[in-house]
Amino acid sequence: MIVDGSDGYFPLEQSAERTEEIRSRSIDLLFVGMGTPRQERFIEENWDRLGVGIAIGVGGSLDVLAGARQRARPWVGRAGLEWLVRMVQEPRRLMPRYLVTNTMFCLLIGRVILGHTKRRLLGG
């Protein structure tokens, strides 16, 4: 049986109330579409109280299925550039996230590579 859902746009203070509502419905499979990382945090923080068999964060998948957002062409995905297509569709939301997190990731990777190179050059 498919049970109708409710939106994920609620204040964090209502998490306990929403969690109890989910638990009371005896749901086996829960799709959480709050967007990343909020949906993952919600599932993790409430897992023991949700009482579900499986919880899946579906994020932007619902937007694509509803036709509100377009998927990248297959070749773009294979080239690893689907993130760019998403950013073009939602620049105000995604550009700051991608600029900050991707920059931090590149800096961390750079430090690791430099550390390995330095150790190799110094014979360590």
Image: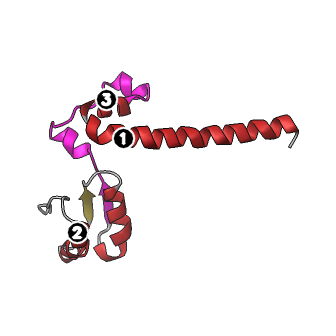
- Secondary element type, mark 1: helix
What kind of residue is marked 2?
Answer: Ile
Q: Could you classify mark 2 by the number of other residues whose Cα lies within 10 Å: few (under 14), some (14-19), or many (20 or more)?
A: some
Q: Residue at x 84, y 34 (%)?
A: 121
Q: Which mark is residue 27?
A: 2
Residue 114's label in the rendered image is none
As drawn, the label of residue 85 is 3
* Residue kind at label 3, given as amino acid type: Val
Q: Is residue 73 magenta?
A: yes
The reply to whether callout 3 and callout 1 are in contact (CB within 8 Å) is no
Q: Is residue 19 left or right of residue 83?
A: left
Image height of 17 relative to 76, above or below: below
Q: Is residue 87 left or right of residue 18?
A: right
Q: Give me the disc on residue 96.
A: 1
Residue 100, located in which quarter of the rendered image?
A: top left
Indicate which disc, 2 or 3, sits on the residue closer to the N terminus: 2
Residue 64 is situated, as x and y percent measured from the top left of the image, at 21, 38
Q: Amino acid at mark 1?
A: Pro
Density class for disc 1 (Cα within 10 Å; few <14, some 14-19, many ≥20) is: few
- Identified at 76% across, 35% down, the residue is 117
The alpha-carbon separation of the residues under discs 2 and 1 comes to 36 Å
Query: Closer to us: mark 3 or mark 1?
Result: 1
What residue span does the magenta drawing correspond to? 54-81
Residue neighbourhood size for the residue with mark 3, other residues' Cα within 10 Å, grouped as few (<14), some (14–19), many (≥20): some
Picture coordinates of residue 87, whole percent (x, y): 31, 33
Of badges 2 and 3, the one in the foreground is 3
Q: Which quadrant does the N terminus fall into?
A: bottom left
Q: Secondary structure at mark 2?
A: loop
Label 3 vs label 1: CA separation? 15 Å
Q: Is residue 90 magenta?
A: no
Is tag 3's residue or tag 1's residue first in the polypeptide sequence?
3
Q: Residue furthest right?
A: 123
